[in-house]
Amino acid sequence: MANTSSPLRQASRAPRALLLAQLSNAIGDGAFYVTSALYFSQIVGLSAARIGIGLTLAWAVGSVAGVWLGHLADRRGPRTTAVLLALATAAAVASFLLIRSFVPFLVAAAVYATAQSGLAAARQALLAGLVEPSARTEVLARLQSTLNAGLAVGAGLGGLALHAGTRTAYLSVFALDAVGFLVCALLLRGLPAVAPAPTAAAGEPRLAVLRDRPYALLTLLNALMLLRLPLLSLALPLWIVQRTSAPGWIVSALFVLNTGVVMLLQVRTARKVTGLPEATRAVGRAGAVMLASCAVFAVTAAGLGPWTTVAVLVLGAALQVAAEMRHSAGSWQIGFALAPAGRIGQYQGFYGTGVPVARTLGPFLVTALLVTWGAPGWLVLGGIFLLVGAVTGPAVRWAERARAQAPEARGATELLGAR
């Protein structure tokens, strides 16, 4: 009789377990994101400036540490590393329950950001070890859809805590997030183990990604494309309130539109991206569509009536989410396909720094362009997206040439020739 718990059968169930793990911590994170700033300001008593400085420093530390933790996942095994980092994230969130002053807040936030960054890299390495390359982009799309769904549910739960406004309600949200990461750790622990990568040969750098200039350029370009992240959460709400005649509720409606479209269509969009040529085209088109979206948003400063402004904003948001889905699918394929097989953890840790960089520096850059310059700022921002999309293709081809000339690639070619 066949063994139903064979490694092959376990691996076939890996995408489902990864989805459930994503959902478990996304619900808690969604509630945490909408309540944490108000908790630390209104309940703990930290100033907005200190909260901002603390989070900026924390994510800066997390971005750097994520590369090292990704390297650790490669060398020690991504499953064990991911489980430990999920537990560390749960502990960091739980420690927020005890925070009463700035220094402990800074330390806890740094641990939280470091564990989150490392966990993201380790989970990517785990996914790479359990999912066939041809299926990775679609699985990542499902994970993104699940993430959006979980964040939406969590945001609703966080809204209940905000409505209550009590210390107990806020602490319940933190406890929910911590439990979510404990469940995540349990689910990841049930996945098959992925063998650690071989130890680097003598003379090879431990963090090869830091010397990979083409990949570093692609990471920078990806971070620039991710400037779309603070658009919906920060810049666009400020723009709507300060520069348009649209009603305030449209901010929430645009967020719901974005989340819903990604949940429904991200997987379908990702299925079209099966290799690097499709990925570079997807990112290039995303840049062009983002330019169109920015141009549409700029029109709303022209003194249109409230309902006309709402219609134009919805059109701009629809273009923005279309570009987001194309960029996400292309970016996932590029980040995985150009990472050496034994170094996916450190490469994904480095590539993933684009998200905290965009979330940390993006609000300043985007609001400086849009709030200060107005409509011309939208066009400048759209031009940046267009340029980044256009440059991605040559950067990918440079990375492919560099990968083909790498010692490990030449050795594999010689081995095949000998056979």
Image (tube, rainbow, N blue to C red):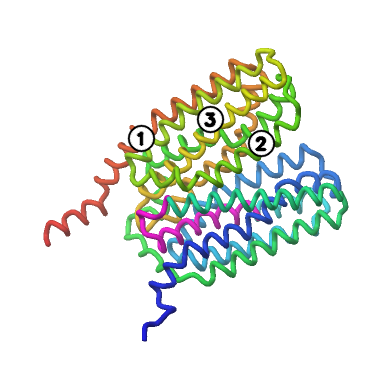
Residue at (42% x, 67% y) in the render: 12
Look at the image and say whether residue 124 sits in the magenta stretch.
yes
Q: Point out the residue furthest to the top here.
A: 302
Residue 81 left/right relative to 197: right
Q: Is residue 162 magenta?
A: no
Q: Is 118 in front, or is 13? A: 13
Alpha-carbon neighbours of circle 3 within 10 Å: few (<14), some, or many (≥20)? some
Q: Which residue is mark 3?
A: 319
| Residue depth check, mark 3 versus mark 2: number of the one nearer the observer | 3
How much space separates mark 1 and mark 2, taking CA atoms?
A: 29 Å
Q: Amino acid at mark 3?
A: Leu
| Pointers 3 and 2 in contact (C-beta within 8 Å) | no
Query: Would residue 19 appear left or right of 199 to someone viewing this image?
Result: right
Give the SS element for disc 3.
helix
Question: Residue 395 has which mark?
Answer: 1
Residue 15: where, in percent of width, then height? 47, 61
Q: Amino acid at mark 2?
A: Ser
Q: Which residues are magenta?
A: 112-137
Q: Quadrant of the N terminus?
A: bottom left
Residue bearing the label numbered 2: 233
Secondary structure at numbered mark 1: helix
Q: Quadrant of the C terminus?
A: bottom left
